[in-house]
Amino acid sequence: MLTVEVLKEFGADTNQGLERCMNNQAFYLKMVNMGLSDKRFEMLGDALQKGDIDEAFEHAHALKGVLGNLAITPLYDRINGMTERLRAKEQADYLPDYREFMDLRGKLLSL
């Protein structure tokens, strides 16, 4: 079960995340759980699999916002780099980066 302490150990800036949630731990944890279950994680993978850079950018950009607002720094840092490469329409194989990103998300969800 995710707690503020677990998130902090994972590398999240829980002080910043809590501040954005009016220092309400229950609300913050609810938002974290909602954010980590966002369907755009899988939709990003589907778009990357199809090679649709524009669609992938839209999903990555949205996830960047969610993860940034929740201050889940390790995931935010991963998606931020991918988002900027997608914004520039850089032709690349994003799937290895996506898999690492999803593995990191899975690690957090298993804590």
Image (tube, rainbow, N blue to C red):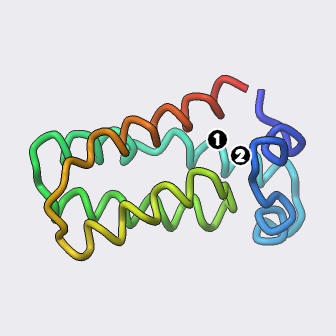
Residue at mark 1 to residue at mark 2: CA–CA distance? 5 Å
Amino acid at dot 2: Lys
Q: Position of residue 106 (x, y in %)?
A: 55, 29
In which quadrant will I find the N terminus?
top right
The tag on residue 33 is 1
- As helix, strand or loop, the secondary structure at mark 2 comes to helix
How dense is the environment of label 1, judged by Cα within 10 Å: few (below 14), some, or many (20 and up)? some
Name the side, left or right, on which 22 lies relative to 102. right
Q: Nearer the viewer, residue 25 or 47?
A: 47
Which residue: 62% across, 29% down? 107
Disc assigned to residue 17: none
Q: Which residue is mark 2?
A: 30
Q: Tell me: residue 61, above or below residue 27.
A: below
- Could you tell me if the residues under marks 1 and 2 are in contact, i.e. CB atoms within 8 Å? yes
Which residue occupies the extreme bottom position in the image?
A: 88
User: Residue 48 placed where, x, y %?
Assistant: 20, 46
Q: Is residue 1 above or below residue 3?
A: above
Question: How packed is label 2: few (under 14 Cα within 10 Å), some, or many (20 or more)?
Answer: few
Instruction: Tell me the element at label 1.
Output: helix
> Where's residue 95, x and y in %?
27, 41
74 to the left or right of 83: right
Q: Residue at x 36, y 59 (%)?
A: 60
Residue at figure coordinates x 35%, y 72% from the top left: 84
Q: Amino acid at mark 1?
A: Asn
The residue nearer to you, when weighing 61 against 96, is 96
